Image (cartoon, rainbow, N blue to C red):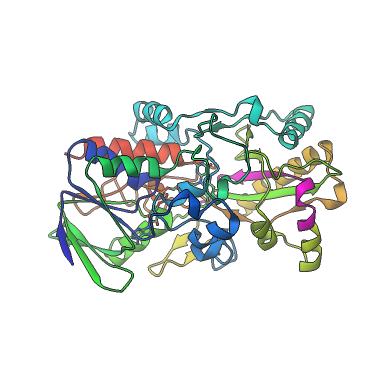
Amino acid sequence: MELNTDVIVVGSGVGGSTAARELAKKGKKVIILEKGELCSPKQWGSEVLAFKFYDKYGLWSRSREGVFYYRTIMAGGTSIVSCGNGVRSLEKELKSLGIDLNNEFRQAEKELGVGPVPKRLIGPGTAAIMRSAQGLGVKMVPMPKLINFKKCIGCGNCVVGCRTGAKWTALDYLYQAQRLGATLMTGINVNRILSSRGVVTGVEGHNKLGTKVKIIAPVVILAAGGIGTPVILLNSGIKAGRKLFLDLFTVTFGITKNLGMSQELTMAAVNHDNKGFILSPFIDTPFALASVVPVPLRRNLKILTKRKDMLGIMVKINDDSRGSVSKDGKIGKKLTRGDLSKLKKGADISKKILIGAGAAPETIITTKVRGAHPGGTAAIGEVVDKNLQTKIKNLYVADGSVLPKSPGLPPIVTIVALAKRLAKRIK
Ligand SMILES: Cc1cc2nc3c(=O)[nH]c(=O)nc-3n(C[C@H](O)[C@H](O)[C@H](O)COP(=O)(O)OP(=O)(O)OC[C@H]3O[C@@H](n4cnc5c(N)ncnc54)[C@H](O)[C@@H]3O)c2cc1C
């Protein structure tokens, strides 16, 4: 199969859908190539349904060294399972690289409906954590979210996909791009970039049946995410995939007598004291919990039966960019001393907060280390320039892989802002 278009966008997640919509608005003929499928909310909303979208079912996606990482392969990308947190990140760092995103941030926040969680959606478990934290001098404030609170029922199922449509996802932009004339082709795995004399000419990939697909275009935007994009670049002879970060996190939780947060809006509050980590009330879904609790299975199962009386706090750090993605998509990610020290500090504070909120000290456990924001693998200043262009002319990157360092914060708003800026600059 061979097709021609003005612009190819690879990946329909946060960066890809944003760029596609902005370019379709400008009247460009856009083809979006997406490896996963386009699904409806009926196909997610529970752990069993959502599992199949997570890379390796979210249970076996680990670095060679055993660090878990999460991403989804589907139209809309990983935004489908986000917690709906919407904050600016890396604003100063990007400015120092010559990228001022102030206008794009403002536009993104308006379109994504960013606002703090209202009181009504702060559940009793979260409120107890906030009070206990306050008593220890750790100020937690309502988290800014990309959520239409009128539609949010606070079910606590954000990470398996929002059924009510309250949470912003990249599908919102993707559908708008389609209405403006963009074409979405799903089930297409892009393998490599085509170029001639240092200028991009298109991409090559294959569909689910293994049939080769070739699309020709004068402009290509890669947005296959912090893991997908470096694989395509490496297979096209461009050095990428170093400096992987994941925004590592652990969750510390404990069992109370009768206070839980399993049916509360996740990450409804946040503490951000610039210590290199954030703290936010969170407990895992049951299967995820079973896979990351570092205790023997029998005790693990016992803990799971108490999930309704569980309180938990996520510690998310800005980790050292020392990981890597190789050509075959395998991840290398060791924990550095700095990473471990931040995670420990956060877990120690969390433990005190949880005890103050009513958790029994002997039940307190911290999960294994995970990451959910892969990036840095095609960083600005290393693989792309400040216009997000690679060394191949008219080949751009617009996703988490361009971020220069680990934000240690939710990156969606920043990726949207960067993709908007790129689309403005493409003639
Ligand atoms: C459980 C969870 C909760 C999160 N919560 C938040 C949150 O609350 N707030 C926040 O800001 N961030 C959150 N994140 C992180 C956020 O979702 C990601 O950082 C963001 O989606 C990254 O955007 P992206 O464009 O880089 O990649 P993605 O959104 O992952 O998009 C990449 C797209 O490329 C496609 N693709 C991959 N390879 C190929 C290929 N070879 N060919 C074609 N298509 C390909 C994928 O299927 C996907 O659609 C969360 C992540 C997880 C896992």
Identity of the residue drawn at 46% across and 67% down? 330
Quick check: can you spot residue 386? no
In the current view of this chain or complex, which residue is farthest to the front?
Answer: 42
User: How far from the left and from the top, in percent, is residue 395?
Assistant: 23, 52
**Left or right of 366 on screen, residue 273:** left
User: How far from the left and from the top, in percent, is residue 74?
Assistant: 42, 56
Q: Identify which residue, 411 or 76, lies in the foreground.
A: 76
**Left or right of 412 on screen, residue 190:** left
**Left or right of 307 on screen, residue 217:** left
Q: Identify which residue, 207 or 271, lies in the foreground.
A: 207
Identity of the residue drawn at 46% across and 36% down? 90
**Left or right of 156 on screen, residue 7:** left
Question: Which residue range is magenta in the image?
Answer: 304-321
User: How far from the left and from the top, in percent, is residue 53?
Assistant: 48, 59
Give the quadrant of residue 313. Answer: top right
Identity of the residue drawn at 75% across and 48% down? 253
Residue 306 belongs to magenta span? yes
